[in-house]
Image: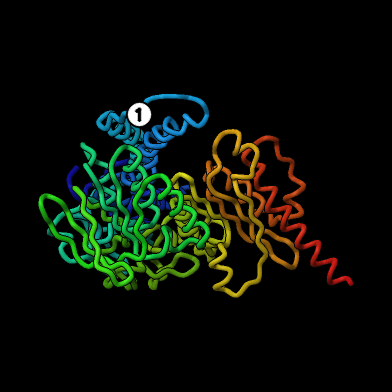
Amino acid sequence: MSLGVPSGDGEIGKTDYDLIVVGAGSGGFAAARTARSLGASVAFVDPGPLGGLCILRGCMPSKTLLATSDAAQEVREARALGVIVPEPEIDFRAMMARKREIIKGFADYRIEGIETFPLFKARARFLSPTALQAGDTVLTARKYIIATGSVVAPPVFPGLAEVGYIDSDAALELEEKPESLVVLGGGYVACELGQFFHRIGVPVTMLIRAAHLLSGADTDIGEGLTEEFRREGIDVRTEALVQRVELRDGKKVVKYLQRGVAREAAAAEIFYALGRVPNIEGLGLEAAGVRAHPITGIEVDSTLRTTNPDIFAVGDVTADYALVHVAIQQGEIAARNAVLGGREAADYSLSKTHTIFTDPQVAVAGESEKELIRSGRPYLKGSYPFADHGKAISIGKTKGFVKMLADPRDGRILGAAMLGAHASDLIHEVVVAMYYRATVFDFMKIPHLHPTLAEIWTYPAEELAQMLEAAQAASAV
């Protein structure tokens, strides 16, 4: 396909549309489908590869690989259940081939949907608030939605670029596993893939600035995951301030300060996992009247409008929540507002629910303790460890805990968090309860099968109910 020539079901030669969506990832695809269902003429501009970050270089390939490392760990831990097996061997090439086949299937399916729209497979650059250049073609539209996603953050440490490193994109495409690895970063990508490499037999050292992994999470979650990583054999070094990187005797050496003491970590490879930044370079946003920042992304209001009210932005390019389900939510809202001229606002109070696919998994719904403390909002907390839960003990899944946060006035559930087995699935029980604005008293009325892992949520709910009843009794005296 030559640049600027549309593919799909669009009229050849057509250059004017009701809506042009720049970027065909999850958020952009949701926006285009929504707008078309409302009767708008819609076109995509995307240079490819088509499919979006989640399918090509994010959620799906990483979880496909984690399935292998998690299976290997299940084999290792089976000894505690009386199953004696040798140390598992990882066929790295077979694992990566499986990943490529699965991701190709996901991508092909998404591309089929994208190509039902006029598609200009070219880089986009705004020429004015109403005109966009796509390759050799100038397009115009009454409204635009920018959904260009994010890219790996550039290296910030002296010597790193010269010595060389892998980022999350490269880590998912390796043909051979590294002999050893230093991971720079302690966020969700660093944690998921750092543990993955450790479990397939790569010695891993993690260097993080904070006092625990997942520095943005509640302290009990971050400290709990850090403890589990160390127990598993991952060398997590906290409060490490990287100074520079150099090559020595065939090893990549990271020099850092830890509480004022000079230290270093050496490995065959460095995994640079210090986040992503909005993909806005070259878009010509100034010509479009759209205000943006290289780190915080395109500025939008609650209706997803940018500083140009005819241009919207959704997904990672806004740097609000790097979550696929949020990008889809934003895409649908932006499309309705663009086509119908509405003022529908995005509400992230529940959709900011997220999970991290480490072992134990992390899942957070609603407000965190950090957020409640920061806002000055009072709350009550109930918690319960998996180590005391009957089903967890029976199946050998005793890592972690659950906690629930409630309003001290009426017991309405404000948030919940979980560090434990199957957290990504079990959190949905609380999400549904919060969607219907349930109190802990409501939650206690929900039947729970015994013995199940889901049953663990009843314990913090019961603790909170008892706190509330005691407070009510005391106030009545």
In the foreground, 77 or 3: 77
Instruction: Looking at the picture, tell me which residue is in the foreground, 430 or 318.
Output: 430
> Image point 63% across, 45% down: which residue?
388
Quadrant position of the N terminus in the picture = top left
* Residue 39 visible from this viewpoint: no
Give residue 412's quadrant in the image. bottom right
Query: Of residues 161 and 442, which is closer to you in this image?
Result: 161
View extreme (front): residue: 261
| x 39%, y 40%: residue | 63
Q: Residue furthest bottom?
A: 376
Q: How many marks?
A: 1
State whether residue 69 is above or below residue 239.
above
Residue at point 21%, 37% (across, down): 176
**Residue under the image location 53 percent in, 61 percent down:** 348
Left or right placement of residue 437 versus residue 302 in this view: right
Q: Residue 137, percent across and down?
A: 21, 55
- Res. 130 image quadrant: bottom left
Instruction: Give the quarter of the figure containing the C terminus.
Output: bottom right
Residue lying at the far right in this picture: please name it.
477
Image color mode? rainbow
Where disc 1 sits, the SS reads loop
> Can residue 158 be seen in the rendering of this structure?
yes
- Point out residue 353 in the picture as x, y percentages from the top left corner: 53, 55
Q: Is residue 433 above or below residue 381?
A: above
Q: Position of residue 12 (x, y in %)?
A: 26, 45
Bin the neighbour count of mark 1 within 10 Å (Cα to Cα): few under 14, some 14-19, many 20 and up: some
Q: Position of residue 337 (x, y in %)?
A: 49, 61
Q: Is residue 276 above or below residue 32?
A: below
* Residue 391 vs residue 46, the one in the foreground: 391
Please give the residue where the numbered disc 1 appears in the rendered image: 88
Q: Amino acid at mark 1?
A: Pro
